[in-house]
Amino acid sequence: MSKSITRQRGFVMKSLIGLIVFVGISAVAYPKYQVMLVRSKMAEALTLASDAKTKLNEFYIMNNRFPRSSREAGDMRTVTLSKPKFVSDIKIDFKNKENDVVIEVYFNEGEIPETDAVTDFLYLAGNKSGDPGSLIDWTCGSDGIDPKYLPSTC
């Protein structure tokens, strides 16, 4: 009879150790998983902004300048696929002080941790390279979004 009690204690101890290991691994893996999910959303948003980038490139090549207004640009925000649910808006800033043109992607509230959905955004900034007939220099970045969430291409 004492043997069955010993086996039961051993089983309980192994289960407890297994549970502790599982919780420990989960505590480390879950935050990394969350960052990975946010980064995938950011990469998808960057792809979405690339459609407007292509249209701005075409406008620049045809006119040797950027559009001066939304009316002149037409609908640069048209996308071939529907906008993902986590993106609230895409804006194009033609009158930016630091860059010639900026494509801004805004996210819905709560999609990107520690950000304000109204003021924080992912951007693609375009600048003339200075050489006549040359292409646009594009840079990727964010305003108010933690850099750890940016796609690796930024």
Image: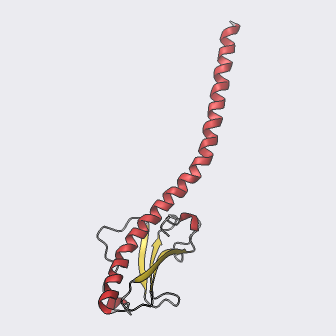
Residue at horizontal 36%, vertical 68%? Answer: 83
40 vs 63, nearest the viewer: 63
Check the image and name the residue furthest to the top.
1
* Lateral position of residue 26 relative to residue 59, left or right: right
Residue at horizontal 32%, vertical 67%? Answer: 82
Residue at horizontal 68%, vertical 19%? Answer: 9
Colour scheme in the image?
Answer: secondary structure
Residue 113 visible, this orientation: no
101 vs 114, nearest the viewer: 101
Give the tally of numbered discs: 0
Query: In the rendered image of this protein, does residue 94 appear above or below residue 86?
Result: below
* Lateral position of residue 119 relative to residue 63, left or right: right
Give the image location of residue 56, x and y in percent.
Answer: 35, 83
Residue 36 visible, this orientation: yes
Query: In the rendered image of this protein, does residue 84 appear above or below residue 50?
Result: above
* Lateral position of residue 8 relative to residue 122, left or right: right
Q: Quadrant of the N terminus?
A: top right
Give the image location of residue 97, x and y in percent.
Answer: 52, 91
Give the image location of residue 67, x and y in percent.
Answer: 36, 91
77 vs 53, nearest the viewer: 53
Residue at horizontal 51%, vertical 56%? Answer: 36
Give the image location of residue 63, x and y in percent.
Answer: 31, 92
- Residue 115 location, quadrant: bottom right
